[in-house]
Image (cartoon, rainbow, N blue to C red):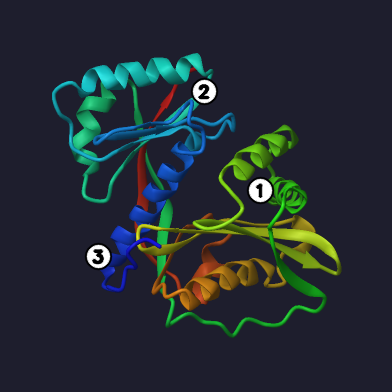
Amino acid sequence: MDHIQTDVSDQALVTAIRANLCDFFRHLSRRDPEEHFENGSFTRWYSPLPHPWFNGILCSNPPAEGDESFIMDSIQYFREKEVGVFTWWLEPHVQASDWKSALSKHGFGFADDTPGMAVDLREMNESTPSIDGFEIRDVRDEESMRTWANVFIQGYGLPPDWESLTFDLWLSLGLDLPLSNYLGYWNGEPVSTSSLFLGGGAAGIYCVSTVPEARGKGIGAALTLRPLVEAREMGYRVGVLQSSEMGFGVYKRLGFRHLCQIENFYLALH
């Protein structure tokens, strides 16, 4: 278990939001020993999933002499992997302004359009309405993981050919902590997903999705609340997430507060 964050001041929560995401990226980078790259300054990860967040670099320090060659090598690395867009992330103590000049001359853009949210797990609103015919199951084997990937793709409206890539990627990340996954069933049919990642001292919620025909019933809230309650029982104090536009109101009703914007640089290679 990582060091648990107990400070619930706003600044500490902002740090926890970013630290959890950074640890998730480290977890991604370590899934494939052949592609794993990690030193004292950078962590790099690659996956066949063609989403910018799943191909990227995490930077632990401001720019230093010699980093220019790493930037150019990484651009070439992702180009050879035929990655369309990759992202460049910063540890919580590193400022975007530190890297703007070094990256912009290589054509990197900057994004900060994703809300970062956090909640004190002792202050959550747990009075969500009951849903007839609804249950949540843990994903503990390959069969349920395959179902999870199918529902996740439907819920996010992603291309169908991403399903097998998502299954392979998520299976490679393991079926137990620090990353655990959940499936919501409504009247016996799988309709919703979520994931819990323990890192950066906080309980991070990822991959909350609900298929269109099951929305508006509180299912997404239930799939968010269940992992957080489990994390609290393990001693965690802080819950964090990156919100979609659709989920923002749901998370606010659970007690999450919008405390920052998630920042990253990105580079389109073709």
Residue at position x 28%, y 46% in the image: 91
Q: Earlier in the sequence, mark 3 or mark 1?
A: 3
Left or right of 40 on screen, residue 261: right
Name the amino acid type tagged 3: Gln
- Determine which residue is flagged by label 2: 83
Image location of residue 160, percent across then percent down: 75, 36
- Determine which residue is flagged by label 3: 11
Image location of residue 233, percent across then percent down: 49, 78
Is 12 or 129 nearer to us in this picture? Answer: 12
Which circle marks residue 156 in the picture?
1
Report, in whole angstroms, how far the alpha carbon at label 3 lies from the one at label 2: 35 Å
Name the amino acid type tagged 1: Tyr
The reply to whether callout 3 and callout 1 are in contact (CB within 8 Å) is: no
Q: Earlier in the sequence, mark 3 or mark 2?
A: 3
Image location of residue 139, percent across then percent down: 68, 58
Q: Nearer the viewer, mark 1 or mark 2?
A: 2
Report, in whole angstroms, how far the alpha carbon at label 3 lies from the one at label 1: 31 Å
- Quadrant into which the N terminus falls: bottom left
Q: Which SS class for mark 3?
A: helix
Is 40 or 239 nearer to us in this picture? Answer: 40
Report, in whole angstroms, how far the alpha carbon at label 1 lies from the one at label 2: 21 Å
Is 213 or 134 nearer to us in this picture? Answer: 134
